[in-house]
Image: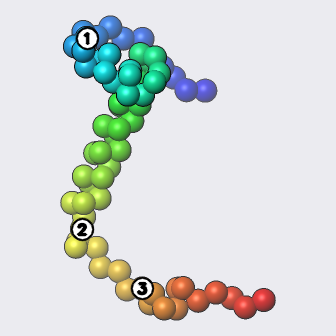
Amino acid sequence: MNKSRRITANLPDELLRSAMEATGQGITETLVRGLQLVRRARAYEKAVALRGKLRLNIDLDRSRERRRR
């Protein structure tokens, strides 16, 4: 079961209205979707920061081979 929190927030009316229009959903669903996008953007930033820092020794040709039946 997901825990949730009830909050009070002062949001710019036009921003909330346009976000709800973009999602086609209500306030709660729109805010949840926005928070998920923020979390996803942060994960992407972390992944980009790792670019070029991981050294992988993978034989791509071998890894793409499929077992014959």
Depth order, front residue of 4/39 = 39
Disc on the earlier residue, 3 or 2: 2
CA neighbours of label 1 inside 10 A, class few (<14), some (14 to 19), many (20+) = few
- Amino acid type indicated by mark 2: Arg
Closer to viewer: mark 1 or mark 3: 1
Q: CA distance from mark 1 to mark 3?
A: 52 Å
Q: Is residue 52 left or right of residue 35?
A: left
Where residue 40 sits in the image (x, y, percent)? 35, 44
Q: Earlier in the sequence, mark 1 or mark 2?
A: 1
User: Which residue is label 2 attached to?
Assistant: 51
Tell me where residue 28 appears, x and y as whole percent: 44, 18
Label 1, secondary structure: give it: helix
Residue ID at (42%, 28%)? 23
- Say which residue label 3 marks: 58
Q: Where residue 5 appears, x then y in whole percent?
A: 43, 16
Q: Quadrant of the C terminus?
A: bottom right
- Mark 1 or 3, nearer chain start: 1
Judge the density around disc 2: few (<14), some (14-19), many (≥20) Cα neighbours within 10 Å: few
The residue lying furthest to the right in this view is 69
Disc on res. 13: 1
Mark 3 Cα-neighbour bin, 10 Å: few <14, some 14–19, many ≥20: few
Q: Between residue 29 and residue 2, name the one nearer to us.
A: 29
Answer whether residue 63 is visible to the viewer in this image: yes
Q: CA distance from mark 1 to mark 2?
A: 39 Å
Write down the quadrant of residue 2 in the picture.
top right
Residue appearing at x 24%, y 60% in the figure: 48
Q: Is residue 69 placed above or below 22 in the rendered structure?
A: below
Q: Is residue 32 above or below residue 48?
A: above
Residue 12 sits in which quadrant?
top left
